[in-house]
Structure formats: structure tokens, C-alpha cells
Image (spheres, rainbow, N blue to C red):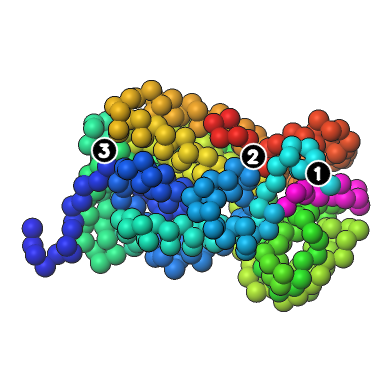
Amino acid sequence: MSTAAAPADHVRTRVAIVGAGPAGLILSHLLADAGIASVVIDQRSREQIESTIRAGILEQGTVDLLTAIDPNTRVHTVGDRHDGIELRFGGEGHRIDFRDLVDRSVWLYPQHEVLKDMLALRLASGQDLRFGVTASRVEDAETDHPRVIATAADGTPLTIEADFVVGADGSRSVVRAAVTGTSKGGYFREYPFAWLGILCEAPPSADELIYSNSENGFALISQRSHDVQRMYLQCDPDADPNALSDEQIWADLQSRVPGTTLKEGPIFQRDVLRFRSFVAHELRHGRAALVGDAAHTVPPTGAKGMNLAIADVVVLAKALVALLDEDDVRLIDEYAETASRRIWKAQHFSWWMTSMLHLTPETSDFDRRRQLGELRSVVDSRAGRTYLAEAYTGWPTGA
Ligand code: PHB
């Protein structure tokens, strides 16, 4: 080996984790807690990871876990507990009271804040965490010594030899091919609409999130802080986020939340979120497994993405500890089935919220009236509201 090369182009660890998103970082923490070393790589820089705008709702179980990881987590100071949401349709708002229905809550705390917290914690604990490292493939997943083949930011080749490889590398996962046999293999559905997301400088328009089904299409009124708000409006998947003026966006948003006057302000960020549902055909093959977006994608309506990723790693961490410390294969053999139970419940919930709240060009008069009947069935029934509250605040881990 040339001494001029980067110091280590060959590392050995127990678990190689590809992806430093919430799933990869939390997994590295849970493993470290059990005395199992890991190396985490991510092709992005720390700044990129910390500044990517994603969703903002944490389930009760996610908050419990983040609190166990760090009792001083900023979720409780910067984040905001929400005890319900509003479903709005036919010009009326209907509160889904989580506390009353299931005695649980959710927290509004943006994903990039979770990432900032977790990155700081992992780095302070001495985690081997490498930014700007791009994985190209996983080799020998069928053996006890799988490898990640990667390239560092400066072009130096890097091989990580491990006892197990985890793909926490998002929807364009490189690890997926080693698990499913193809990079795409999975159950998939695409929706004929997207969300135009905006960030604006304005005070909150409501105390809680408003999910609004209107004749003009769906809108979601969410929040970020006392002076920054996050809102979404249903749009065409190919829409140019910059095609509309601020005035047009505000007029559109106002028309979609009849009965509430939204507080307006300058819009400083716009993005289009496409709607997809995906579950990989296989979640584990030999000594490689998938978690988070590498394993599944949900449309954002149910706010399940990051929560589901974290639920996966809670299951996987236990299985890896049993496998690597006790040579016990039972939990890892059950990983795909255990994780799938929650994944498909979350898939259903995300699809259901999406289908109940959005209109498509194909929506007939019958469909429209049926949809309003469905919303009525939910809000008029304690059982209906309870299902929504249970799913939204999150099922217990392992369920
Ligand atoms: C958000 O605040 O970004 C958010 C909240 C709820 C959702 C999706 C996104 O269902």
C-alpha cells in the first residue's frame, strides 16, 4: 500500500452502516450502547445532511427513544408537543384529540434538527463517521464477512469489512441490490400528484396542524416556529416550484382552507415532493439488511417516513446484538417479518390519509361524495378517530 494514500483505505468493523440519516445514526448509537462498534459512511457532507429540509412530526415512541438517548434532547425545548390535528372538509374543522383518544401525542421537531442532535452526539462519543464517502456496492453478503466497497471524497478507494452491513442509504440505496438482487426490486405505486412545500416568514395560523380536503385540492398547514411556517399544497408532480408568485400561492392556499384566514408572509423556500409508496421485496439477505427509505418510501401525508425508519432500527439493533454477541440467529431471521408488520400498517395509513384527502383529475362526482362520506365516517365515530389517532401517534415498537 502506498504511504501517500489516505491513512486507511481498508477498515474492519463489526457493523458497516451506509447512510448517516436518522436510521443510520440511531442504529450506531444503539449498537454502541451494546458495545458493538460500527463505521457509518455517507456520501453527503455534514452541512448537507444538517440542512436538508424534511418532514417535522415525531411519533410518541420516537420522542421516547430520543429522550432515552439524551434526556436533555432539544425535542422538549425547541420542539412543540401537539395533542391533536384538525381534519378540515366541507368548510368545517374537526379536531382529532390524540390525548383523549389514545393518551399519546406527537412532537413537531424538524428532521434536520434530529440530525444535528444525533451527529453531535455520535461525534462526541467517538463514532467512526465519515462524510463524503460514496458506497458503490456490497460484496459477499452471503458470507460472515460482507464488505462495502466505497470511494472517499478525495477519490481514495475504501473497503469496509464487517460482520454485517446495513443499508440506511435512502431511496436510491446502493445496498439494496445486495439484498433484493436488483437495485429497484420492490412493491411500488406512484400517485398522480405531489406537494408544493413552502417555508414562509409568518406567525402560526393555527395551534395544531390542519389537513384540509377542499374543492380546490388538498392543503396542509404545518409549522416550524413562532415566526416560520411550513405549508403544503397539492400540485402536479411536474410543477415548477417557481412558476407561481407568492400572491398566487397565498390565494391558492387560502382557498383550500375555507373557514380559516391564514397569516401570510414572505415565502423563502419552495420544493416539490413527489408521492410514492414503495417496499423492497426483501429486507434482509444473509448479512445485509435494509432500514428506512432504503427499505420503503411512504407518501408524506401520514408523517411516517422518519418514524418508520427509526422503528426499523430498533428492531434491527436487537437482532444484531443477538446475532453478533450471542450467535443467536433467531431475531435476525425474523427481522424482515417483524419490520414488515409495521411497514405495511404505515403503508396502509399513509395511502389511506392520502386517498382520503386528495382529489385527482379522475375523481368522479361519485368518488368525491364517497370521499366526503369516508371523512364523515371517521370524524363522527370515536372508533374512526381512535384508529387515526393510534396510527398517527405511532404503534408501539414491534407492532
Ligand atoms: C411537516 O411539517 O413538514 C409535515 C407535517 C405533517 C406531515 C407532513 C409534513 O404529514
Can the viewer see residue 144? Answer: yes
Examine the structure image and report whether residue 90 is included in the region drawn in magenta: yes
Mark 3 to mark 1: distance in Å? 46 Å
The residue labelled by disc 2 is 394
| Marked residue nearer the N-terminal end (1 or 2) | 1
Element marked by disc 3: loop
Quadrant where the N terminus lies? Answer: bottom left
Residue under the point 66% across and 53% down: 107
Marks 3 and 1, the one that precedes in the sequence: 1
Question: In percent of the image, x 14 and y 64: which residue is there?
Answer: 5
Residue designated by label 1: 96
Residue 222 is situated, as x and y percent measured from the top left of the image, at 72, 59
Horizontally, residue 254 falls left or right of residue 77, namely right
Seen as rendered, the residue at the extreme bottom is 266
Assess disc 1: are there few (<14), some (14-19) or many (≥20) residues with their C-alpha within 10 Å of its C-alpha.
many
Q: Does dot 1 land on a helix, a strand or a loop?
A: strand
Task: Assign the magenta stretch its main secondary structure.
Answer: strand
Q: Residue at x 38, y 48 (%)?
A: 28
Going by the numbered disc 1, the residue's amino acid type is: Ile
Q: Which residue is mark 3?
A: 163
Labels 3 & 2 near each other (Cβ < 8 A): no
Mark 2 residue type: Gly
CA neighbours of label 2 inside 10 A, class few (<14), some (14 to 19), many (20+): many
In this picture, which residue range is highlighted in magenta? 82-94
Q: Residue 389 magenta-drawn?
A: no
Q: Residue 72's mark?
A: none
Residue 237 seen by the camera: no
